[in-house]
Amino acid sequence: MSEKVICTKGIYPEFPRKGPSAAPAATHYCPGCGHGVLHKLIGEALADLGLQDQTVMISPVGCAVFAYYYFDAGNIQVAHGRAPAVATGVSRATDKVVIAYQGDGDLASIGLNETLQAANRGEKIAVFFVNNTVYGMTGGQMAPTTLIGEKTITCLNGRDPLTQGYPLHMCELINSLKAPVYVERVAVSDAKNIRNARRAVRKALEIQRDGKGYTFVEVLSPCPTNLGTTSVKNNDFINNEMAKEFPIQNFRDNSATAEHVVRSTSDFSKEKLDAMFELADIPAAIAHNTANFEEAQVKIAGFGGQGVLSLGIMLTQAAQAADMKVSWYPSYGPEQRGGTSNCSVIVSAKPIGSPVVYHPDLLVAMNRPSLERFKNDVKPGGTIMYDANMGDVELPVGVKGVAVPAQALAEEAGSDKAANTIMFGVMLELGITQLPEAAFARALEANFAKKPKLIPLNLAILEFARQWVRKNVK
Amino acid sequence: MATKLVKGNTAVVIGALYAGSDCFFGYPITPASEVLHEASRYYPQMGRQFVQAESEEASINMCYGAASAGHRVFTASSGPGISLMQEGISYLAGAELPTVIVDIMRAGPGLGNIGPEQSDYNQVVKGGGHGNYKCIVLAPNCVQEMCDMTMLGFELAEKWRTPAYVLADGVLGQMIEPFTFPEKAVTPKGDNSWAVCGTAETRKNLISSIFLDFTQLEEFNTRLQDKYARIEAEEARCEEQQTEDADIILVAYGISSRIAKTAMDVARKTGLKVGLFRPKTLFPFPKAALQRLASKPVTFVSVEMSNGQLLDDIRLAISCQRPVELVNRLGGNLITLDQVMDKINHIAGK
């Protein structure tokens, strides 16, 4: 007896991806299953709309895991519940028609987050959701859509809302979001419903063809095998019981007003990249003699908000301007947000090993807790610059202390936020970093490049600090 | 040659952009978030795709989608996020999809803290998800390499059709150094022989990791192992400093290798023959180079911010022929110079 092959548009005539088979045109689905009907509706629509050459079909985990056996389009098989995320990636990358085909466990349980988030972003994807109230592939467990009182192998006495909650209504959930263009629930339980489903499937794919955004079609579908019933009874169950809990209706159709969502086109040119990173206007390095340059290890510490990290950056910029090797490493995370903050800067003529400063040549302490925390780490012969507003301090023997009224000087010089620039100027005048004078000015220019009005002010503050050193530090 | 001061996490994004990556999908996590920030800033300016995903699972699956279409895609995260991505990375390896994953390691286990650690070594280098797979793992130790190795990651991932990691840590992600911008920008070509792009040419293609037949899956696994063997033969990279005459060889990658280098320099000044062996690829682990060093009577010291995870691979590579000592810190603490010096002096009998 020869098998009669009925070809369906958009579906392969035979299914070799299934492997060697005596019935190469038979699907892997059980008798009475609704997947076959929905496959046919989608396949036909893809063919009729001429979309097969521009469609990526995503097979989920569940009974439709092998959807790629059947759909004559580009096919991707993905992890359980992740189809909307994968669809997002495909859609953003290609801007083609993308279909996520998913069952109730996949879409409404493990993949609920991906489902809602992709819908909420209004991804240009068509989601077809097969709701048969039961896990199929894994053997008949309770699904998020299992009806109250409905029996499955994990709710043998029927779903009890006190312990197992209530059925999830996916169309209603999706319909609470702003972005989706089209939301409809249909069924494949009888000829009338199938005709209606055919219309909804086409509508969703037309919206995809036109690039208008997210569509969601829920399909109430039979699974006689796992519900332990017959095809006829299962279809009655859909029409009489499921449809009460999950009304068959259109929830939204914005297709008439929705516009084509245009995705940007990638620019790969080096010119554009170089321009974006402003590589044209990098000034030449400031020449200076580095023959006797000794590595300078600097630790800068204070309250978050005292410009501790940016003082470190300014020093790093000065070193960079002078073509030195330099590294900057901050304390990061919550410490940046209001607590104490510190950074390490190393300036060297040779490649730098560890970027973390444990024993600084120079410690800049903007507040007392920072001074107390780090003062004993300073190298013998090293320097500690600290804000004079701390009053009396006790410093380790063999370390030079410089009390700088940084905050007061900054205010006097015209900015209450520039205590760090005062410290920068003191650093320059003391010559601890061995960097040329011009590098300090360059650093200020670089640091305030986004606020150019502040450059002259900070240059003046730098000079103000230097004069203070000349008068007050011996 | 254009040189600027750049943060490690920013260098990753620069590398990706010049390598022709046109899709970034990510989720916030300290200390990797700047990669997300910078991608959000620069990808749209270049007309490229950026999505802040709802989770790390979603990020890696968005990568799976874009990679399936043959695009150069990447994501970045840190330990807890990488743990969440492992399912997706197993699928990427199973479907042989090129993707670059940047891991800016922090301290664990659990929520741990945001300080630097190197404790993702095992979950990154050994596969990490389910199944018999490995990913290429590149280990930068400076801001320049954060960029260069990201670019290399895209090349190798595509060449071998496998996910590639850039494995760095909180210090490398957060630090700023002078950085020279890439000399070339890549326009990616894609590969229509396997990708699924929604085109007539690729309509016949299928991306999948299912083999229902046990023997077929075994054959596929065997083919994967052959691929990994070829990667081991061709792609192992390392850097050696002063190993020729060394009695003690420090072995370290990433930020620990910088600390080890400082220790080597200090030790050499005191007359001790100390060398440095730095794996630049962790898979493939540079076994042959290490075996060559083990032919002499040396002592190895694994300098790592993890609990001997690197040390295990050193011992495996040299079949335990030589002693391998451990210097490590955990919990977000960095290894100190003093700590390494103490170990060196102890081994040297000083």
Image (spheres, rainbow, N blue to C red):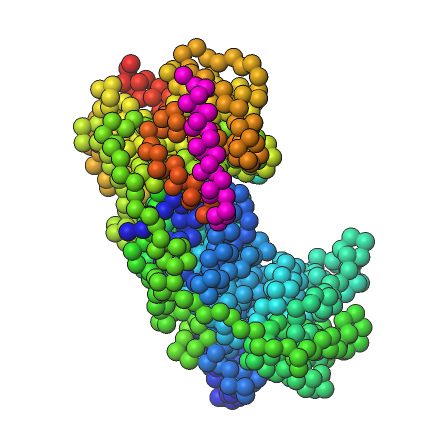
Q: Which residues are magenta?
A: A450-474
Identify whether B71 is placed above or below A299.
Answer: below
| Residue A47 horizontal/vertical position (percent) | 52, 85
Extreme top residue here? A397
Q: Position of residue B150 (x, y in %)?
A: 37, 51
Q: Is residue B237 left or right of residue A66?
A: left
Q: Is residue A105 left or right of residue B120?
A: right
Is B214 inside the magenta-drawn segment?
Answer: no
Image mark count: 0
Spot occupied by residue B65 in the image (x, y as percentages of width and height): 48, 64
Tell me the chief SS of the magenta region: helix
Query: Who is closer to the viewer here, B154 or B227?
Result: B154
Q: Is residue A62 above or below residue B255?
A: below
Which residue is found at the position 25% from the left and 30% from the top?
B275
Residue B258 visible somewhere in the drawing: no
Where residue A262 appears, as percent x and y from the top left, is: 53, 73
Q: Is residue A186 above or below residue B246?
A: below
Q: Residue at x 30, y 46 (%)?
A: A284
Residue at 57% x, 73% y is A261
